[in-house]
Amino acid sequence: MEMIAERGLEKLTMAALGREVGMSSGHLLYYFGSKDELLLRTLEWSEGRLGAERARLLSGGGTVRERLDAYVDLYVPDAQGDPHWTLWLEVWNRSQNAEADGDARERQAAIELAWHRDLVALLAEGTSRGELPPLDPDRFASRLRALLDGFSIHVAIGLRGTDRAQILSHVREFLDEALAPTDS
C-alpha cells in the first residue's frame, strides 16, 4: 500500500516491490503466485483494516444518521489517487478478463457484501427505531452504494469538479431528501 500511495500502481512491479521489501520477485511469486493474487491479498488486508474501522464507527454512539454519515465518510476516497481506491479499481479491472479466477471474484464479492451487510443493518436499525422513514434497507443500501461507487470513482480518478468535499455534499443532500420524514 505504501508503494501504491507513493508511486502509483504503474510503478508497482514484482521486481520493484521485491527490492522494496528485500526479496526477489521470484520469492514474491512463490508466496503469491501472481501479481493479481498479491493485489487481491493487499486489498483484503486493507479492507480488513477498513472493516474494523467501519465496525467501530457503526457500533459507536450517536444517531443512525450520524453513523450513516460516518459510513459515507469512510467509503468515499480521500482524494485523487487514494491508494485504497486505486487498488480497488485495479482489482476490479483485472477481474474482467476471461482468465480471472472464480475464487478471486468470490473474494471480491465477499468484500462488497461486508460493506452492504453493514449498511443494511444500520438502515434496518434506523427504521425499527423510527429514526428513519419506512424503507426497504436492502434496496436502499444497493442504491446508496451505487451512488457512492460512482462518485468515489470520480474522486479517485480526479474527474474535474468532483473533489471529496463536493461529493460528500451531494451525498448528504441525497440522504437529506431520501430520508426526510414522511407525513403519515
Image (cartoon, rainbow, N blue to C red):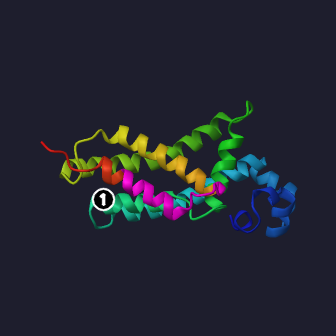
Q: Residue at x 81, y 63 (%)?
A: 17
Q: Is residue 180 above or below residue 46?
A: above
Where is residue 12? Give x, y as percent: 79, 59
Query: Disc 1 designates what residue?
Result: 65
Magenta residue span: 157-174
Residue 75's place in the image compared with 100, above or below, is: below
Q: Is residue 150 above or below residue 69?
A: above
Q: Residues within 10 Å of mark 1 (few under 14, many from 20)?
A: some
x and y percentages locating residue 86 in the rendered image: 66, 55
Query: How many discs mark residues in the rendered view?
Result: 1
The furthest residue to the front: 161
Between residues 130 and 28, which one lies in front from this camera angle? 130
Callout 1 amino acid: Arg
In percent of width and height, residue 56 lies at: 40, 65
Q: Position of residue 100 (x, y in %)?
A: 71, 35
Tell me if I can see residue 22 in this picture: no
At x 69% / y 49%, what residue is drawn? 90
Asked if residue 102 lies left or right of residue 130, the reply is right
Give the quadrant of residue 176: bottom left
In the rendered image, which quarter contains the N terminus?
bottom right
Q: Residue at x 63, y 51 (%)?
A: 88
Residue 158 sits inside the magenta stretch: yes
